[in-house]
Image (cartoon, rainbow, N blue to C red):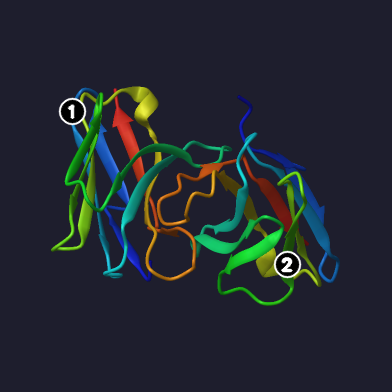
Amino acid sequence: GENVEQHPSTLSVQEGDSAVIKCTYSDSASNYFPWYKQELGKGPQLIIDIRSNVGEKKDQRIAVTLNKTAKHFSLHITETQPEDSAVYFCADVGGGADGLTFGKGTHLIIQP
Amino acid sequence: KAGVTQTPRYLIKTRGQQVTLSCSPISGHRSVSWYQQTPGQGLQFLFEYFSETQRNKGNFPGRFSGRQFSNSRSEMNVSTLELGDSALYLCASSLALGLDTDTQYFGPGTRLTVL
């Protein structure tokens, strides 16, 4: 993609509450939107992804929604747990040959 | 199945030197992509290799290069190192059915420090 904006940069929630991270993209040709979780000292780990022909996808406590008209997609984590604390990155793959374009990341903090 | 492995995990070099980083993809994966991660610029795409050929390239100077071998293992090289090259270099592998639909799996990265 060309540009991916991610908000918020830091998110602190109480354990058990839900967390929502939002991303917007600019490339109309983008058709694949993965989310990665990165823990300290590790590489990004894919947690869920969605393709442009689907509006929502869920995997246990994690869900992603996609609105192609508005060019935004969101990550929803329910019943947050301490192990959810990490940096989360959204990304897209656009029409150009430029690999994954990442957002700047969201530092999710789960308060006990 | 083993994940993506990268060697070395940590590296310290001085300005002007060159460095080679290695990546072994997940067994059966044919595409390897490289990314640079820095606090200021975030995660940025360097290049992608498939069948020993560079298929895509990001916006980085020619000092950054790579190659892929017949067993899909890949190396990236940075020549004439600059202080700004200090970063975490991440390798990702995918099956290579098509970059726009491929799931990319990342290795742990190589932390390069340039003094």
Q: Residue furthest bottom?
A: B61
Q: Is residue B103 left or right of residue A79?
A: right
Q: Quadrant of residue A13?
A: top left
Numbered circles on residues, count: 2
Residue under label 1: A17
- Label 1 marks a residue whose chain is A
For the C terminus of chain B, the quadrant is: bottom right
Residue in the image at 20% along x and 62% along y: A71
Q: Is residue B85 left or right of residue A67?
A: right
Residue under label 2: B65
Give the x, y percent position of residue A29.
Answer: 30, 67
Q: Quadrant of residue B50?
A: bottom right
Above or below, B76 against A97 in this view is: above
Q: Of the residues shown, which amino acid type is indicated by label 2?
A: Ser
Element marked by disc 1: loop
Residue in the image at 74% along x and 73% along y: B63
Q: Of the residues shown, which amino acid type is indicated by label 1?
A: Asp
Give the x, y percent position of residue B33.
Answer: 59, 54
Q: Nearer the viewer, residue A52 or A2?
A: A52
Give the x, y percent position of residue B30.
Answer: 62, 46
Q: Nearer the viewer, residue A39 or B21?
A: B21
Q: Is residue B23 left or right of residue B80?
A: left
The answer for how far apart the CA atoms under marks 1 and 2 are is 45 Å
- Label 2 marks a residue whose chain is B
Above or below, A83 against A6 in this view is: above
Element marked by disc 2: strand
Q: Is residue B7 left or right of residue B36?
A: right
Q: Nearer the viewer, residue A5 or B96?
A: B96
